[in-house]
Amino acid sequence: MGSGWHEWPLVLFTVLGQCVVGAVIVKGLAWNSASNNSELQQKMVRAMFFIWVLMGIAFLVSVMHLGSPLRAFNSLNRVGQSALSNEIASGSVFFAVGGFWWLITVLKKMPLAIGRVWLAATMVLGLVFVWAMTRVYQIDTVPTWHNSYTTLSFFITVVLGGPLLGTLLLRAVDYSFHHIKLAALSVLALFVAVAIIVLQGSELAAIQSSVQHASALVPDYASLQVWRIALLALGLGCWICPLLRRVKPKTPGLLIGFILIVAGECIGRGIFYGLHMTVGMAVAG
């Protein structure tokens, strides 16, 4: 029994990957809104380099989860049949399509009209990637995962971390893009996350195998969730407090906020993996 941190490669892969998807959507919308300013668009594209670096780190970390990293490509052997293969394939396509768009655009070789369509396709592929992630854990023999909370939680991470990361990179090029609306969306996601914690926590006591109760899998469930929510609130506070004072958030403050959000969601994802149990036999870290 534990916090699920034994699955740290998957924790980082899913959290960082979902934050990247949210940031790509925010940056994509901002890029389209600045279509009359090609110089600003180029600055935005150059700043997106850090998004793809994060995505690359997420994939590299995920390889650590495999028994033999050198056989990583074997995970693609059952695309269309295996949820895991679909996850890796959809993530790879998202990474490749988005990264190629970024490379051609930063080299100023991408026609504007084609670039818009290509970027829109990248954003859709990102959402498909997150959806494919959720399908990996919809296993009917794992009752603690096989529910709507799993799907909702993964998309909540997109809305919690993505807008803040996107705003951070936009602030780095001194471009304000719907700060208040994006912040309000992330705050709403925080409230939904709290609701999920309360509802799921109350239902864990009713889930049990022939060996043990689900509520015993993560004994520190309540305290860990409190730490998670505190970190998420502090992270969003680094973004929202300056807005309430009607001043532009500073880049260092946004960076700290994003780190706090990632830390909070890593705790939440660790709890998720710690809740793994199968019908007839409990398995925990």
Image: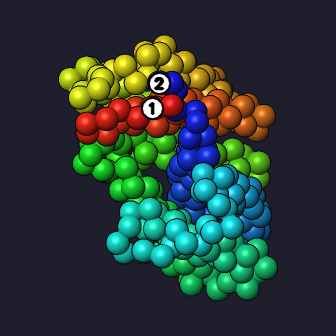
Image mark count: 2
Q: Tell me the residue at 59%/72% (across/down).
A: 73
Q: Tell me the residue at 54%/78% (across/down).
A: 118
The foreground one among 246 and 68 is 68
Image-quadrant location for residue 47: bottom right
Residue at the extreme left of the image, as rendered: 206
**Residue 128 seen in the current view:** no
Q: Is residue 111 left or right of residue 146?
A: right
- Mark 1 burial class by Cα count in 10 Å: few <14, some 14-19, many 20+: some
Q: Is residue 78 left or right of residue 238?
A: left
Which callout, 2 or 1, points at the residue further toward the start of the chain? Answer: 2
Q: Which residue is mark 1?
A: 284
Q: Disc 2 vs disc 1: Cβ atoms closer than 8 Å? A: yes
Is 274 situated above or below 114?
Answer: above
Q: Secondary structure at mark 2?
A: loop
Q: Position of residue 42 (x, y in %)?
A: 75, 68
The foreground one among 263 and 174 is 263
**Image disc number at residue 1:** 2
Label 2 sits on what residue type? Answer: Met
Q: Is residue 107 left or right of residue 220?
A: right
Label 1 sits on what residue type? Answer: Ala
Q: Tell me the residue at 35%/47% (across/down).
A: 151
The foreground one among 42 and 123 is 123
The foreground one among 178 and 83 is 83
Is 89 situated above or below 22?
Answer: below
Q: CA distance from mark 2 to mark 1?
A: 5 Å
Image-quadrant location for residue 98: bottom right
Q: Position of residue 50 (x, y in %)?
A: 74, 56
Q: Position of residue 256 (x, y in %)?
A: 72, 31
Image-quadrant location for residue 185: top left
Q: Secondary structure at mark 1?
A: loop
